[in-house]
Image: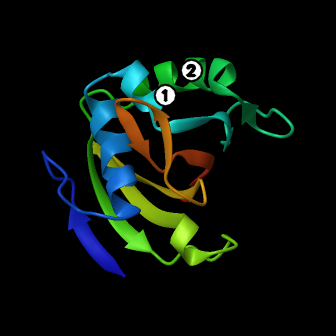
């Protein structure tokens, strides 16, 4: 398992960079930037909403991300990368164990399943998108 501190300016290439970008945008409260990381038909499976089948599409994901930005305000976090075991192909997924700290510590496992190839979505946006995000709190 590789241990990485959250960088101010992520310079990592490959699938890990989307994880750093996700958390950077969350920290900066850039909702449009975070949503731009997701495919239009993305799904988030998270433990809070109790919605069968997860949050589907950007319209359902946006309110969840608004809550995440508020809940994680002023929290420090550390990211450790793991092998994504639930993904069909390792090159299409990245798993991260994230430790959040503000007073006490909480850990969550994030599994980002990405679009299978780099696609051009508009003239300024070329790259993989988050197709499915699984969030599981551990402690």
Q: How many marks?
A: 2
In this rendering, does residue 96 appear at all?
Answer: yes
Using the rendered image of the protein, determine whether residue 139 is visible from the camera's viewpoint. no
- State which tag comes first along the sequence, 1 or 2: 1
The residue at the far bottom in this view is: 1
Q: Residue 35 carries which label?
A: 1
Nearest the camera: 126 or 8?
126
Residue 44, percent from left and from top? 66, 40
Residue hosting label 2: 62
Q: Is mark 2 on a helix, strand or loop?
A: helix
Q: Residue at x 45, y 75 (%)?
A: 82
Disc 2 crowd, CA 10 A, few/some/many (<14, 14-19, 20+): some
Residue 109, numbered label: none
Q: Nearer the viewer, residue 79 or 132?
A: 132
* Residue at (48, 51) in percent of width and height: 128
Judge from the rendering whether residue 54 lies leftward or rightward of residue 124; answer left or right. Answer: right
Place of residue 120 in the rendered image (x, y in percent of width and height, measured from the top left): 48, 41
The quadrant holding residue 2 is bottom left
* Mark pair 1, 2: CA separation: 7 Å
Measuring 19% from the left and 52% from the top, which residue is drawn there? 10
Q: How does the figure colour the protein chain or chains?
A: rainbow
| Quarter-of-image position of residue 29 | top left
Residue furthest out toward the left? 8
Whether residues under marks 1 and 2 lie with C-beta atoms below 8 angstroms apart, the answer is yes
Classify 48 as above or below 116.
Answer: above
């Amino acid at each position: 398992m590789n241990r990485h501190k959250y960088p101010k300016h992520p310079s990592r290439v490959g699938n890990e960079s989307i994880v750093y970008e996700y958390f950077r945008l969350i920290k900066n409260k850039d909702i449009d930037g975070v949503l731009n990381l997701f495919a239009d038909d993305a799904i988030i499976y998270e433990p809070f909403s109790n919605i069968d089948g997860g949050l589907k599409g950007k319209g359902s994901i946006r309110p969840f991300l608004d809550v995440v930005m508020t809940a994680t305000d002023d929290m420090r976090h550390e990211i450790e990368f793991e092998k994504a075991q639930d993904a069909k192909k390792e090159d299409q997924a990245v798993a991260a164990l994230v430790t959040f700290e503000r007073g006490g510590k909480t850990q969550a496992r994030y599994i980002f399943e990405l679009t299978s190839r780099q696609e051009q979505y508009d003239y300024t946006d070329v790259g993989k998108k988050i197709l499915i995000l699984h969030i599981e709190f551990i402690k």
